Amino acid sequence: MPHRAAPTDAGGSAELTVDELARRTHTPVRTIREYQTMGLLPPPQRQGRVGIYAEAHVARLALVERLQGRGYSLAGIRDLLAAWREGAELAEILGLSPDQLVHVDEPGAPATIEQLARLLPALVPDRLSELVATGVVEACGPDRYCVPSPSLLQLAVDMLAAGYDGDRVLDLLGVVGSAATTVSDAVMATLATVPAQADADQLVALATRGRGLLAHGVGRLTVHSLGRRLGITDESAVGDALRGLLTKDGT
């Protein structure tokens, strides 16, 4: 007897076979399998030989579709999801749920100074104002601070753990923040010069899709530029290139 989807409970959970998931989300079964192979979709729970999918899988497929509409490639979405997993780890440290901290378009629920201090004791609270000035953390209410980019916050945590001092970490974050402002200013200047024969709907679609293309493209271009500076032509050589850089002075 074929499996039937269970009624959705108060928590929004359901049990779906792959065929039911495909019908529910209008996604071919072949595409669902492909997304699982690429790591875009978590594997189902197993009930005997049957894979059972839940509401989380429905939400993930909807997210992938939205991001594709904004210009992200599947590889780009995979990278973004990996970054969000890092953000989820930060959320746990901050005492928030992952969906509170990491959002597609928004920083999500704010953190307190105490929560940030647990994460970055070398910078918070003594140098909180400097951290806010970089844009990696921003004030969003009385004693509340939002995190627009959990990945950059994770970078700060990792740099401090590796032995870099607070000055060096804040300098790098400040450069990244300034670069983001420069890019944003250039985009705003471009948007202000509306083509004479512009179609309003087309421009809105461009702006919506362009945000995703810009977010992914700037990150990719930065990584590519860094690779060129390191003389890396093959991803497999990253470790050796970095090791050579770090030990060139015999340290």
Image (cartoon, rainbow, N blue to C red):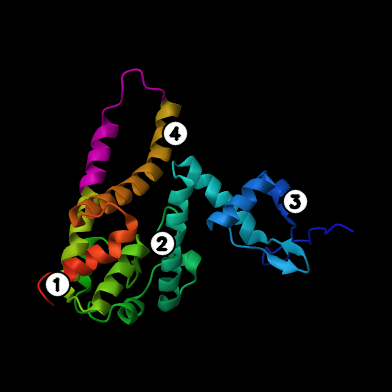
- In the figure, is residue 174 to the left or right of 146? left
**Mark 1 touches mark 2? (CB < 8 Å):** no
Secondary structure at numbered mark 3: helix
**Mark 2 touches mark 3? (CB < 8 Å):** no
**Picture residue at 66% right of the left edge, 60% below the top:** 55
**Mark 1 touches mark 3? (CB < 8 Å):** no
Q: Mark 1 or mark 3: name the one nearer the start of the chain.
A: 3
Q: Residues within 10 Å of mark 1 (few under 14, many from 20)?
A: few
**Cα separation between marks 1 and 2:** 25 Å
Residue indicated by mark 1: 167
Q: Mark 3 or mark 4: name the one nearer the start of the chain.
A: 3
Magenta residues (range):
182-199
**Cα separation between marks 1 and 3:** 54 Å
Above or below, 11 relative to 192: below
Above or below, 200 relative to 126: above
Secondary structure at numbered mark 2: helix
Numbered tag placed on residue 83 in the rendering? 2
Q: Mark 4 or mark 2: name the one nearer the start of the chain.
A: 2
Is residue 114 found inside the magenta-colored segment of the image?
A: no
| Residue type indicated by callout 1 | Asp
Q: Residue 102: which quarter of the image?
A: bottom left
**Cα separation between marks 3 and 4:** 32 Å
Residue indicated by mark 4: 205
Numbered tag placed on residue 19 in the rendering? 3
Q: Mark 2 or mark 3: name the one nearer the start of the chain.
A: 3
Does the rendering let one see residue 124?
A: no
Q: Mark 1 or mark 2: name the one nearer the start of the chain.
A: 2
Q: Mark 1 or mark 4: name the one nearer the start of the chain.
A: 1
Residue 218: % across, % down = 30, 47
